[in-house]
Amino acid sequence: MITPVDIQNKDFGKKIKGYDCDEVDDFLDEIIRDYDALIKENRNLKNKIGMLSKTVENYKSLEDSMTKSVEIAKQTAADIKENANAEAQMIINNAKLDASRLAKQIDDEHIKRHREMLKVKSETETFKTRITTMCENMIKMLDDAQ
């Protein structure tokens, strides 16, 4: 590659009907300035490309990390939902078992405990409704979180 110094140090042979030396020197000086400016600009652009390439690689790395984090978050949400559904089903099953036991006990009690039996049965139904509502709300919250 020709450098500005090579252009500056170039000597041409002289002939009788040759070019005007001052014009040639002035033109070469202009070429040297332009060539030197192009070399500097080229070096700056190469440095800038290097920095931008590093920045792009950093962003790609960040994107990969974020993608992995999103996948982990999705899996975690799915696991939480599955666990909540299992827990809700267990609560409902336990509530149903408890209600069945209470109903059997109430049925076996004496007639004079009839009013007390109705009260306990009503409370059991309210409890079941609250548990069911609470479980449905938990499931809805999990669905909305996705």
Image: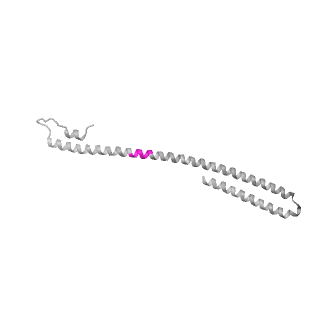
Q: Is residue 67 left or right of residue 133?
A: left
Q: In the rendering, at what x and y percent does residue 76 appear? A: 60, 49
- For the residue pair 11 and 20, the one nearer the viewer reads as 11
Q: Which residues are magenta?
A: 51-57
Q: In the rendering, at what x and y percent does residue 41 appear? A: 31, 45
Residue at figure coordinates x 63%, y 53% from the top left = 142
Residue 100 position by quadrant: bottom right
Task: Using the image, determine if residue 69 lies above or below residue 126.
Answer: above
Residue at figure coordinates x 70%, y 53% from the top left = 88
Task: Using the image, determine if residue 27 lies above or below residue 116.
Answer: above
State the colouring used for the structure image. Answer: one colour
Q: Is residue 22 left or right of residue 69?
A: left
Q: In the rendering, at what x and y percent does residue 110 appear? A: 88, 61
Residue 20 position by quadrant: top left
The dominant secondary structure in magenta is helix
Q: In the rendering, at what x and y percent does residue 43 appear? A: 32, 44
Q: Is residue 40 left or right of residue 101?
A: left
Residue at figure coordinates x 62%, y 48% from the top left = 78
> Quick one: which residue is furthest to the right in this view?
111
- For the residue pair 30 and 8, the one nearer the viewer reads as 8
55 drawn magenta = yes
Total numbered labels placed on residues in the image: 0
